[in-house]
Image: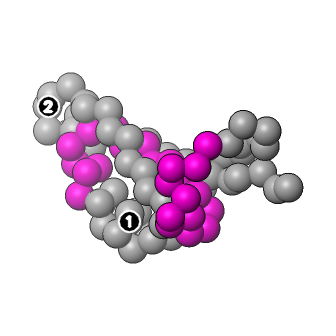
Amino acid sequence: MSAHHGTILPVNNGSKQLGFSAMRILLTNDDGIFAPGLAALYKWLVDLGEVTVVAPTECWSGASHSITFHEPLACTKVEISGS
């Protein structure tokens, strides 16, 4: 069986420009890292604090209640243009 692969986007600290302590925000989904809704939320939240995005590399809708015990989890940091 193959490992579940996730993706982590870089953290952005837009709130420092506003002059207050950054809120730490974790944004995740089960639709995959390239889901348009995830990108839209990221663009809105980045002005509020430090945003970390964790999402699967492909759509895992309907599997959000699954648990992985015997397979390794792997994460890869990616840059997505326009985010």
Quadrant, the N terminus:
bottom right
For the view shown, which residue lies furthest in the top direction? 21
Residue at (27% x, 43% y) in the render: 14
The disc labelled 1 sits on which kind of residue?
Answer: Ala
- Residue 56 is inside the magenta segment: yes
Residue at (61% x, 67% y) in the render: 58
Q: Which residues are magenta?
A: 44-67
Q: Residue 16: where, in percent of width, then height?
A: 23, 34
- Residue 14 is inside the magenta segment: no
Where is mark 1, residue-wise?
Answer: 39
- Is 17 on the left-hand or right-hand side of 73? left
Q: Which quadrant of the view contains residue 79? A: bottom right
Residue 19: mark in rendering: 2
Quadrant, the C terminus:
bottom left
Residue 10: mark in rendering: none
The disc labelled 2 sits on which kind of residue?
Answer: Gly
Q: Secondary structure at mark 1?
A: helix
Q: Secondary structure at mark 2?
A: loop
Residue at (22% x, 38% y) in the render: 15
